[in-house]
Amino acid sequence: MTESNGLLLRQFQYDLPDERIARFPLAQRDASKLLVYRRGEIVHERFSGLPALLPKKSFLVFNNTKVIPARLYFTKPTGSIIELFLLSPFPNDLPISQSMEATGSAIWQGMIGNRKRWKRDETLLLQFAGDAEHSDIDISVSWYDYDQSLVKLSWQPADLTFAQIIHYAGEIPLPPYLKRDPTEADRETYQTVYSKQEGAVAAPTAGLHFTPAVFNNLSKQGIGYDYLTLHVGAGTFQPIKTEDVRQHHMHTEQVVYTQQNLQNLLQHTEKIIPVGTTSMRALESLYWMGAKLINGENEPFRLDQKYAYQLPTTDQPTVKASLTAVLQHMIETQQEALVAHTGIYITPGYELKLCKGIITNFHQPGSTLILLIAALIGDEWKRVYNEALQNDYRFLSYGDSSLLLP
């Protein structure tokens, strides 16, 4: 790897002073600042004015995943506290929304805090008061597969769903860089106003700025939009630790597409703007899944991080052909919704297929999200971030926003 390749970690770092990290949200979601980068020009606006700033006939794509209270704490008789951070249901090809409706018991993969104090044959218990309808709730957890970090949770009353159980017992998992405990207010403010499909352990934070008023103004401006679902995993916060950023192991996330998504996208292929990096990952993944389908490859709806860089240009279909192939597959197999898994890794040198820009917050130095932004606007990301720092923008999940149009 040589310097000219431009994919060394140090080239995607910048100095982010701690005081620029937004620890709490603004009282009014759409009052945040909005940096608009349009073909090299930068202007500073307010997010409430976004609809009028978008290119005419833009089509926005939102991620309607909902963050679950994924942190559970079990206290052993010795006083030791075991933290269970739920990541994904097992088996992982189950729709997460379906797993949230499980009753009586469920198997999940998790990250275990204080793991060495939890013996393989030990069952942990959690008892608490629910509400007037369910006054006493008992949860037990035991190892299902120690080496794979799989645990089995069981609960009483058994007719409660898994979603209800963690709503009572769990804690919203704020990003580690906020360096604070969650408050009751975070249960609302760390969700988008359009969040619907439970299953994420991190919010698609670009969407936190949207309000009913902004949506109303989108409609007035003739801006169309749609929702898909990508359940954001904890891997979104995983820092890159390799000098050559392409050696980083990318996490995989579950994404759900509907026939309506495909039909809408096919009508707007030249004007698609994702709201957030997760929406961009979902949209770009959809193209490559269609390509896999057209090329008759195995597991077309499971995308690894390298596939987008391996398919020769001559084997890459048009966007419309790719989307049409996925839609036809769904119609033929009578699937109204398609569950897929993507580990797509968007780095500089990647040619964007569906996305013509992005609405996104300001991301951590040296993160996979910075690489994605650099893939969209090249080295201009440094000028954008420098402008934001010089103009007192608030950074990361609860921070300000940007509209980037190359």
Image (cartoon, grey):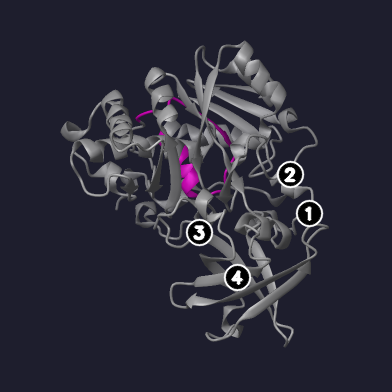
Vertical arrangement, residue 157 with respect to residue 399, above or below: below
Which residues are the magenta region?
Answer: 353-375
* CA distance separating discs 1 and 4: 27 Å
* Secondary structure under the numbered disc 1 in the rendered image: loop
Q: What residue sits 38% from the left and 43% below the top?
A: 347
Please provide percent x and percent y for residue 44. 66, 23
Q: Nearer the viewer, mark 2 or mark 1?
A: 2
Pointer 2: what residue? 188
Residue type marked 2: Glu
Q: Nearer the viewer, mark 3 or mark 1?
A: 3
Q: Is 97 left, or right, of 26 in this rendering? A: left
Q: Nearer the viewer, mark 1 or mark 4?
A: 4
Pointer 4: what residue? 154
Q: Is residue 358 magenta?
A: yes
* CA distance separating discs 3 and 1: 24 Å
Please provide percent x and percent y for residue 212. 70, 25
Pointer 1: what residue? 183
In front of the other: 196 or 306: 196
* Mark 4 Cα-neighbour bin, 10 Å: few <14, some 14–19, many ≥20: many
Quadrant where the C terminus lies?
top left
The answer to whether mark 3 and mark 1 are in CB contact below 8 A is: no
User: For residue 88, which numbered disc appears in the image?
Assistant: 3
Of callouts 3 and 4, which one flags the residue occurring earlier in the amino acid sequence? Answer: 3
Residue type marked 4: Ser
